[in-house]
Amino acid sequence: MRRYSDYDPFAWLYANAWGEPFHRAVQAPLERVFYPHLPARAKVLDLCCGDGRLAAVLAQRGYSVTGIDGSEEMLSYARERCPKARFLLADARDFELPPTFHAVLSTFDSLNHVMTTAHLARVFQRVWDCLRPGGIFLFDLNREEAYVNSWIKTGANVTENLVNVSRGVYYPETRLAICDITVLRERHGVWTRSDFELRQKFHPHKTVLAKLQAAGLEAELHDAADLGMKGEIGTNRDFYLARKARSSAE
């Protein structure tokens, strides 16, 4: 399966401008429904770990952290940000790790980038494979309202050495969201331009829950705002808390 590398050209913008607001906001949901389930020194897999911002927080809390991402550019930032963690270049749909993890975490609507239901089911199966019995899996997804109300807006950010413009569109008939991004960046007095496209897919609740159950993961659904995630980032976003069944011997 082709590695999901679409974030390679996006890595600098994410690491320097876009990542911080989400990772600051996501700490409230993690405090409520993730950290309380983990034992001390738990083994945690940060799936679609991006620039390692969250991996660094997990490592600071004393967890043994492994990060997986399909973007080598993202991982270059992650390794610099969190040298204590182990980072692997791999696709969320096709990685293989032994069943030693107490928890798997995937944030910032990363799994909305999985473009088909069949591929989402593959991700869930890979997660089940690497979890210990009783292990948990927490991830967030955008609801359709997020694409209708927020994604389709045009946004811009202008600083002394950066201009970026994002333009989104959503196609409800296919549940496909596309964001075209233009970045103008000044380095050493020279301006360069890059253009790239990010795609996401809206996955309905019933589909997600059914595929989790088919993979052997029982899940509960939480509204991000109810978990204390504030502002537009926490609007029309859901967190799924899933668990792998304990073995009969436990």
Image: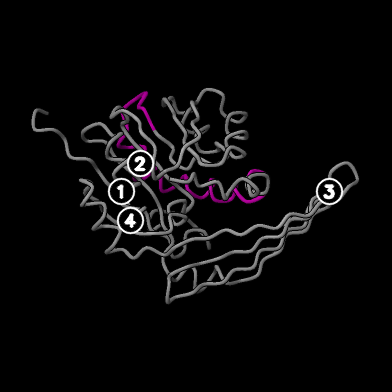
The CA distance from mark 4 to mark 2 is 27 Å
Amino acid carrying mark 3 in the image: Glu
Give, as a single range, the part of the protein colored magenta. 15-44
Q: Earlier in the sequence, mark 1 or mark 2?
A: 2
Instruction: Report the mark closest to the observer, 1 or 2.
Output: 1
Q: Earlier in the sequence, mark 4 or mark 2?
A: 2
Question: Is label 1 in contact with label 2 (beta carbons under 8 Å)?
Answer: yes
Furthest toward the left, the residue is 248
Residue denoted by label 1: 241
Residue denoted by label 3: 186
Instruction: Report the mark closest to the observer, 4 or 1.
Output: 4
Rate crowding at label 4 as few (under 14), some (14 to 19) or many (20 or more) other CA atoms within 10 Å.
Answer: few
Q: Quadrant of residue 174?
A: bottom left
Amino acid carrying mark 1 in the image: Leu
Q: Position of residue 161 (x, y in %)?
A: 82, 50
Q: Residue at coordinates 44% horizontally, 63% vertically from top-left?
A: 201
